[in-house]
Amino acid sequence: MPGNSIGRMFVVTSFGESHGPCVGSLIDGCPAGLEMKVEEVQEFLDRRQKNVLGTPRKEPDKVEILSGIFEGFTTGSPICLLIWNRDVDSSAYEELRYIPRPGHADYAAHARYGGFNDHRGGGRFSGRITAGFVAAGGIAKMLLKRIGVEINAHTLSIGSVSVKDALPIEKIRLAYESPVRCADLEVSEKMVEEVKRAEAEGDSLGGVVEAIATGLPPGIGDPVFESIDSELAKALVSIPAVKAVGFGEGFGASALKGSENNDQYFYEDGKVSARTNRAGGVLGGLSSGMPLVMRVAFKPTPSIKLEQSSIDIRSGKEVKLRLRGRFDACVVPRAVPVVEAMCSIVLADQCIRCGLISQVLR
């Protein structure tokens, strides 16, 4: 399968570039009979932009559904989701065509595509393409809702500021009330200050997004190479700027003893449960029935205003570089719905594979 598609039965193909005419996605394999309005997809897509710590690029992000919907229901045919790029300014990028920006994919892309790639705004490697991910994820979330599976994400840390205590799902659902998508409003204020400080210094910050899927029954996944965690990891690492993904304790599990790390079982109301969830809801590549907990680490935004060193590919000489243009000091707040979307796409695909979601919905 080409590198721009993900999924086996619920297949999402991404298209578009940062400064091209549009971005979007094509969904093939969405079951027929899902009741849907474009406003519902738009509502989820709006989470990338509304009430979020500002970005200089102001895109309306109005989604158009070109196919696959008839009389308010999915038809079973491919669904084309298109989002026009309206606020494009490529003036700052022409001088960078042969000067790769540190921390970006510019040089690697030039080498891979022989210089024919669209370099403007990062082109295909820009976070802008995630608008198409989110639109497709909105439809995946609708499918999962039908079987009682819910996915919520929130900002766990930005720079040196982090949420210390575990938060209940009820509170995490309110994360979008924060401009940095942090469900702890006291910590949220500190994160805002941290981002503004870095921006004033011409620098940037990274952070961690946590996503939690609830309502997933045990036994979902296709080990070994298409296990639920390997598929989720692949999808999440495909988000621009992601550098690490962990489940449950993640790297922290390596410092625990087996007696500390094992989640011990018990019966609760006749159902199997566990007293802890250090495994993060996945064992042996299969869902365990406990909440599926993922943490996604984002690097600092590579575009910064400080002077940096680079090279001129044409002359072979080293040069000094100070970037112009529009970029976020921290991508984490706008990445929260992207993480939700990618988790939703993978889980919808997995649930269709195992028959939890049928091909025709009634």
Image (cartoon, rainbow, N blue to C red):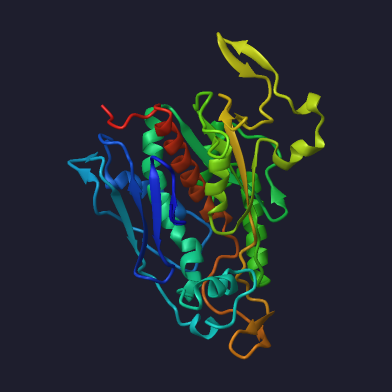
Please tell me whether residue 45 is drawn above or below residue 291 in the rendered image. below
Mark count:
0
Is 262 on the left-hand or right-hand side of 324?
right
Q: Quadrant of residue 309?
A: bottom right
Q: Toward the viewer: 349 or 168?
A: 349
- Left or right relative to 7: residue 30: left
Residue 43: image location, x then y, percent = 37, 47
Q: Which of 14/110 is in front?
A: 110
- Split into 4 quadrants, where in the image is the C terminus? top left
Q: Position of residue 159 (x, y in %)?
A: 69, 56
Q: Position of residue 190 (x, y in %)?
A: 67, 52
Q: Where is 313 relative to 238, above or below? A: below
Residue at the (54%, 71%) spot, across then down: 112
Q: Give me the residue at 57% from left, 29% from top.
A: 286
In this rendered view, identify the residue nearer to me: 262 or 29. Answer: 29
Q: Position of residue 11 (x, y in %)?
A: 39, 46
Out of 142 and 155, give the one closest to the viewer: 142
Q: Residue furthest bottom?
A: 315
Question: Can the viewer see residue 203?
Answer: yes
